Image (cartoon, rainbow, N blue to C red):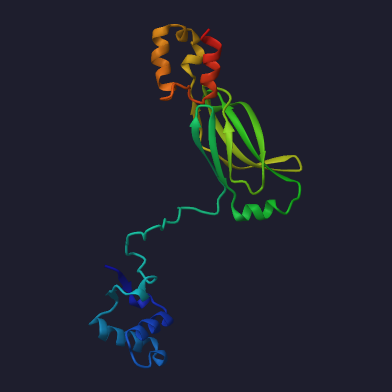
Amino acid sequence: MKLININRLSDSELKYMAEQEGIEDADSLDRTELIENLEEIYGGDASELDVDKKFVKTLIAKETETDALPGVRPLPDKFNDNEIQTILQDPAWAYVIWHISHATKEKILRNENVKIILRVIALKENNKKEESYQVEVGIDDTTWNIEFPWKGRNYEITLNAEIDGVLTTLATSPIETIPNVYVEDHPEILRNPETYKVLSSSLITNGGEYLAVDEVKQILSGNLT
């Protein structure tokens, strides 16, 4: 059921509804006459009409809840903001996606010396900055693969604009926690045949090949002699 508050409709919307209902000379009627004619058609008080016609698809009363149409997503709570997010691919890499608002881009593009910088920051206890590195990306880029080189740390990534050597932070990602890899800290367990079978069973494909993970290759090549 769709409810339309007829009193909130514009004159042009009322005229359009009247024309769709076959009311004669609808274009020449004033607002009061249009409402009266529509009330006669819909019966009595038409302050809120229960109708389901193609011409009312954009006239839903604000307070009425309706199901979203297929393929239609609701607007976010906020928009036109700068934002950066990370999606972990494995303990060493993250897929980073960001958005720079139109207003910010307009300001940035005025300067020919602008650079867009991703700064990867490793955090220690209490999330104090400890180590970092940065990557320059293109002004029109929106995604990047980022390495987390130090295990057992928390990370955040800042999206920055650098103009004439001055770095301005546009957005900061949520903090990601990268755990220590136990086998890297205890390579001796791989020398034991029994523990090796258990640990390596999930790292081998059906064809008997090791998974293409650099950390696994490094550990196995250095400790299985």
- How many numbered callouts? 0
In the rendered image, the residue lying farthest to the left is 43
Please identify the quarter of the rendering in which residue 222 is found. top right
Residue plotted at (48% across, 7% down):
188
Q: Nearer the viewer, residue 173 or 187?
A: 187
Residue plotted at (50% across, 10% down):
187
* Residue 63 pos. (x, y %): 34, 64
* Residue 5 pos. (x, y %): 33, 73
Q: Is residue 6 left or right of residue 151?
A: left
Q: Nearer the viewer, residue 153 or 127?
A: 153
Residue 148 drawn above or below residue 65: above
Please identify the quarter of the rendering in which residue 45 is found. bottom left
Residue plotted at (29% across, 72% down):
52
* Residue 195 pos. (x, y %): 40, 10
Residue 16 drawn above or below residue 133: below
* Residue 110 pos. (x, y %): 72, 54
Residue plotted at (47% across, 7% down):
191
- Position of the N terminus by quadrant: bottom left
Residue 162 drawn above or below residue 27: above
Q: Is residue 1 left or right of residue 86?
A: left
Q: Nearer the viewer, residue 144 or 114?
A: 144
Q: Is residue 170 left or right of residue 64?
A: right
Q: Is residue 18 left or right of residue 158?
A: left
